Image (cartoon, rainbow, N blue to C red):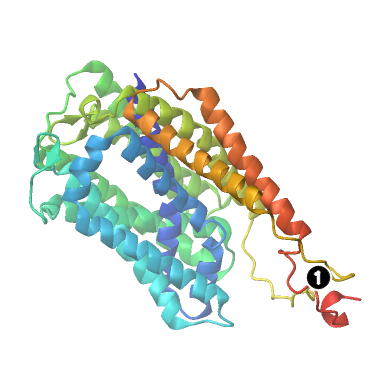
Amino acid sequence: MLEYATYTLVLLSLGMYVVLDGYDLGVGMLSLFAKGESRREYGELIATAWDANESWLVLAGVALWAGLPGVYATVLPGVYLPLIGMLLAIILRGMGLEFQSAAAGYRRGWALLFGASSLAAALCQGLVLGGVLSGLEQRDGSFSGGAFDWLTPYSLLCALGLVALYLLAGAAWLQDKTEGAARQRAGRAGRPLLAATALAALILGFGLQAADPQEFGFDEPVRAALFWTAVAGAAAAGAVAWYGFGRRPDWRPFAGVVTAQVCGLLALVVATAPVVVPPGLTLHQASSPPGSQTFLVVGVGLCMPVVFAYNAYAWWAFRGKFTQTPEAPLDPLRVRTGAPRQARPEPGGFVVVVRRALLTVLGAGLAAVSQDVFGGVAAWIDPLGVTLLSAAALAAWIISDRRDQRDGVFDLDPDDQDPVRTGT
């Protein structure tokens, strides 16, 4: 049963990434059709949450690596080229966004880099998804095909369909977060994009039967009922989004698009499970040993509330319509004043030896914990040992920070008595 918990964590992480990062990739692509300062406005609109959205992709990668190593051994070699292209596009996208935001005014080059890399990332994600759904040649649990097996007609259609979906989510988000001309443009673009996405979903849905080499079990009553329920939910949510574009309240199209995305992902999972990599790699075959599964479920499960809280706080802090306020100058920096500090004497040789020995033991213990847990032994390191080692590391961190603060390490320039900088 642990493999199903791991599978749920992977699906939740990937679903959250598609929902959250999908709309800001869509906004980036829509910025290519804007002009001048509007492109900068699109970037500033998503600059508050894009890095938090991409954290779900990292979490999904960790869960796959630790919980489903068979997927790594099969999928990564099969889709190396589009996957590397996606990672490079995400890096360039962050560069374009941050450099444009830090610039004094609109910079056409950075804005175009942001939009073009958003498009490249969406296309590469679609190629990865389509390549996996088209089936990867496998032998003894590893990929045995060629470097371009991912390039199929179905993967190209998946890339175009995912671009349409992300554009639709971006238009819905822009209507919710903007006013004036930007909102009007988003409202006008929403319905054509929704029609294109629905057409792509129909083509990809019927084409999956021909592209995917696995046998679908739609003759099973429970599977068929869940699948068609998810499809009906996606259709109803699409109708809500269609009606909401160009009308108030402005949040309705985005809610409809998000619901349709979730229903579509659930329909895909219901159709393919328990196969995780077509044509025949099942969830049980791809899973890691029970010890690793337990460690993953506990570790990633404890991280989930933190990531959820971070995303929720970002949404709450930047709720409402986006407004571009003029930048105010920063206040003068303040540094601690007072008598010059006396240099602390260097610790003696015995203290240095003991400190280094303790740090060595701590590092060796952490390495042993990792080897013990992932090796499935669990004989001489128990949860109490993990807790004690973690507490020791945290205590060393806090003590070191307090000592550095007392010694003035965090002060910019303790000896500078300039009244302008000190505020005196």
Task: Describe residue 53's horizontal placement relative to residue 337 as left or right.
Answer: left
Q: Can residue 193 be seen in this view?
A: yes
Tell me residue 118's x, y (percent): 37, 64
- As displayed, is residue 380 above or below residue 356? above
Q: Which of 231 and 295 is in front in this view?
A: 295
Quadrant containing the C terminus is bottom right
Residue at x 58%, y 68% (from the top left corner): 180
Looking at the rendered structure, the kind of residue marked 1 is Val
Quadrant containing the N terminus is top left
**Which residue is the extreme one toward the right?**
424
Label 1 residue SS: loop
Q: In which quarter of the image is residue 347?
A: bottom right
The residue identified by callout 1 is 335
Q: Nearer the viewer, residue 86 or 219?
A: 86
Q: In which quarter of the image is residue 94?
A: bottom left
Q: Nearer the viewer, residue 366 or 152?
A: 366
Q: How many labels does the image show?
A: 1
Q: Is residue 203 visible?
A: no
Residue at x 40%, y 48% (from the top left corner): 57
- As displayed, is residue 141 above or below residue 191? above
The crowding category of the residue bearing disc 1, from other C-alpha atoms within 10 Å (few below 14, some 14 to 19, many at least 20), is some
